[in-house]
Amino acid sequence: MISFFFVLPYRFDTSAVVKLILRGAGLLLLVIMAGILYSLFISGDRAASLQLLISGLIAGYFTRLMLRNLVATRGTITRDGVELEAVALYGFRLHGPAGRFPLQAFSGVQVERVFPPVFAQGGPHARVTLMGKTGTPDVLVARASREAGRALGQSLAAALGLPYNEVSAPY
């Protein structure tokens, strides 16, 4: 069993995974753009440039969806509350809450058990979230292995005096 000794203030940052995904999407868009320029001005292949343009539009659409929907959080948890910082990547603000929220604005700590994907790499893991009451956002505190997530969630709930809840993720 994994155990955590929780010391407040606790700094957390869940933006690394989101930034990695978005950097990959940005790199893909740059490669497609270079391919379009090469096809137009060097090889003169207009059909290839049109196909690359269509690929770029599709990749751009999905990158925009990822920018809007992938949640990146960074902040500090203290005995008084949670201070959340805005997270940016190359000047673009990533989706996620920012601001200062009192501890009383949270209803508990929830650990979502996520099952491994069926057709992709990855294993079972957990997301640890501070659940906000009405008007307060839910705050993703950590992504971890199942056992580490469970231990972190229980320790966080005990340190903050909040209820602990564990659920299976819907996806």
Image (tube, rainbow, N blue to C red):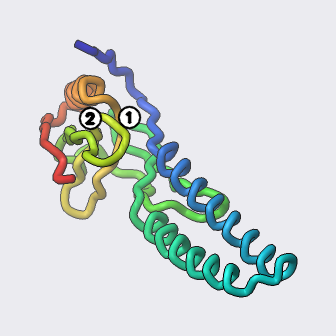
Place residue 12 in its image quadrant: top left
Residue 154, x across and y down, in percent: 20, 27
At x 47%, y 70%, the residue is 62
Towards the viewer: 20 or 43: 43
Amino acid of disc 2: Pro
Residue 85, x across and y down, in percent: 50, 51
Towards the viewer: 55 or 100: 55
Count of picture labels: 2
| Disc 2 residue crowd, few under 14, some 14–19, many 20+, Cα 10 Å | few
Can the viewer see residue 159 in this picture? Answer: no
At x 26%, y 40%, the residue is 116
Towards the viewer: 147 or 35: 35
**Residue 128 vertical position relative to residue 92 in the rendered view, above or below:** above
- In the displayed structure image, the side of residue 160 where residue 100 appears, left or right: right
According to the picture, the residue beneath numbered tag 1 turns out to be: 78
At x 41%, y 58%, the residue is 70
Residue 1, x across and y down, in percent: 22, 12
At x 19%, y 61%, the residue is 134
**Residue 143 vertical position relative to residue 169 in the rendered view, above or below:** above
Can the viewer see residue 25 in this picture? Answer: yes
Place residue 76 in its image quadrant: top left
- In the displayed structure image, the side of residue 1 where residue 96 appears, left or right: right
Amino acid of disc 1: Thr
Mark drawn on residue 124: 2
| Extreme residue in the right direction | 42
Question: Does label 2 or label 1 sit earlier along the sequence?
Answer: 1
* Separation of residues labelled 2 and 1 (CA atoms): 29 Å
Mark drawn on residue 133: none
Element at label 1: loop
